[in-house]
Image (tube, grey):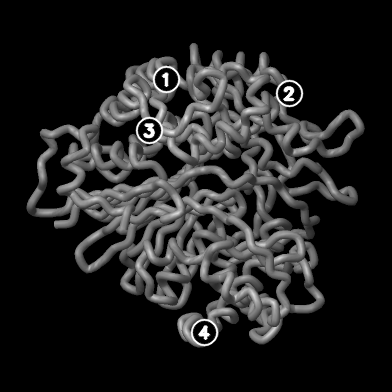
Amino acid sequence: MKQLISFVAIALLTIIPAQAKHHEEKSIGTAASAHPEATKAGFEMLQAGGSATDAAMAMMLALTVVEPQSSGIGGGGFFLHHDAKRNWMQTIDGREMAPAAAGAKRFLDKDGKPMGFRASVPGGISVGVPGNMRLMEMAHKKWGKLPWEKIFEPAIRLAENGYAVTGPQHFWMKRLGGLWKDFPEIRALYWRDGAPAPVGTIITNPELAELLKDLQANGADAFYSGETAQAISNAVANAPQNQTEITQQDFDNYRAILRAPVCSSYREYKICGMGPPSSGATTVLQILGMIERFDMGKLYKESPAQSWHVIGEAMRLAYADRQRYLGDKDFVAVPVDGLIDKTYIAKRSQMIALQRARPEFPGMETYPAGDPPGAQSRTKAASSEVPSTTHFTAVDGEGNIANMTSTVEGPFGSQLIARGMVLNNELTDFTFTPEIDGAPVPNRVQAGKRPLSSMSPTIVYDKSGQPILALGSAGGKRIIMHVTKTLIGVLDYGKTLEEAMAMPNIYFGGSGLLIEGKSDLVKLQTELSKLGHIVVTSGLPSKLAGAQKTDKGWTGAADPRSIGQAVTELP
């Protein structure tokens, strides 16, 4: 199992100080992420006596350096924290915010039609005010144990001394090569000798190291004012494409927001996640609620095709509600309680026929949204999220849990660089069409608004109220399904977290039910077709990471499809 590194093995990793002591009396904890260097950074904080929050924030900073194609301080995220002493959970919304210059017509062309997605991503108009540093500031004040300065040390070392280019990073460098001819600053960082840096190339980022040292010494305020804020404003205003403005007032107006988690029961468990502007918790809980009337464990053993069929039908119904009702609840009325109402979900579940896909709903667009209690009449409109992002989890020796999904949206975000960091393209998560048939779209662009997200950091509690599972994933809109199938694997099928992560991924596209190619699901393609599905094989990559409570203690896990790793010390 490549993801799990024992405490003995970790002693061989030179990035972790040799003086860290092995506590015989209790576990240091576990850290898991989509990149080995980030996992090392998180575990280093645990070894130093830090909290789960300290470890998670060290991973977030390290990922800024080593996984810039996915996340970093130039973007935002959602943070879940379980307090072991108080036995309760809180969440922080660090989602990016649209600047004052962003109006409803931001992504319309001169003819008033929505811009193409690829045309809108690179350059200034896709950049939202980053939220991760304010999120980190709030999380550290509430739950940090180590000095603020300490948490930056691994990331600064990586930026100064360098890290090795990975296969996934090289893939995106190569894929974006045609675009980067117009973005020389990012090409200078990640290309060598006129080509994408080969796998194994050591990348240093002295400018980013200086930025991290500035934040280390002067706190999050140094990000939202002075040299850094001006560098972001300049990058957006002078972008090679799609120039616009982000003002000092926009930075001053940004706040990380402490929000109530969204929770509901599933069988004997309680499952909690992030509320709007995330669509994660409501959609995950809807899917699980709709399959709850089925004996999924028995179905999986006796008729695996039917088990995936049921999941696929619930998925389409839940996503139909997601498209109609979800958005930033500070701007639109989101019927959260209605969407997860048990009576409402049970009614939706009756639309699932065990023996056959509904013939009147041949494609995703024909699956109807429902009428949850408290919902206002809405139009349904799609938003764009590309499969990037990252997730990381830390559990400390006291049982505190930090579970965070972080993103810059698409690969290398907007392709803009400010002080060595990649700036997000998060505003393309808004729905480009502001209204349909005269009705405003819930996820339309508005100044000060946060775009809808599928990021789904999740914590599961057992019947005694104790946490047993924490996880999340990358994957754009597919994140919801990566998390949901993993939950089903653990809670219904009795698999370990690592085994459940390895289960095939499933999604939808057009009229088709998408199944992961080169997986066991391919063997079920004929049976799924007989159940009425148009089955299409697809890559469906994921980057799950998380931790599970076992008889021996908390153990981390990372998606076998990724280069991610987990480091665990058990008592």
For disc 2, the marked residue is 242
Q: Secondary structure at mark 2?
A: loop
Residue type, mark 1 in image: Asn
Among numbered discs 4 and 3, the one appearing first in the sequence = 3
Lateral position of residue 55 relative to residue 167, left or right: left
Among numbered discs 1 and 3, the one appearing first in the sequence = 3
Quadrant assignment for the N terminus: bottom left
Residue 399: tell me if it is visible: yes
Residue type, mark 4 in image: Leu
For disc 4, the marked residue is 299
Along the viewing direction, whichever of 70 and 540 lies nearer the viewer: 540
Residue at x 75%, y 78% (from the top left corner): 358
Along the viewing direction, whichever of 347 and 106 lies nearer the viewer: 106
CA gap between label 1 and label 4 equals: 52 Å
Q: Secondary structure at mark 4?
A: helix
Q: Secondary structure at mark 1?
A: loop
Q: Position of residue 313 (x, y in %)?
A: 66, 73
CA gap between label 4 and label 2 equals: 52 Å
Which of the numbered marks, if any, corresponds to residue 205? 1
CA gap between label 4 and label 3 equals: 42 Å
For disc 3, the marked residue is 62
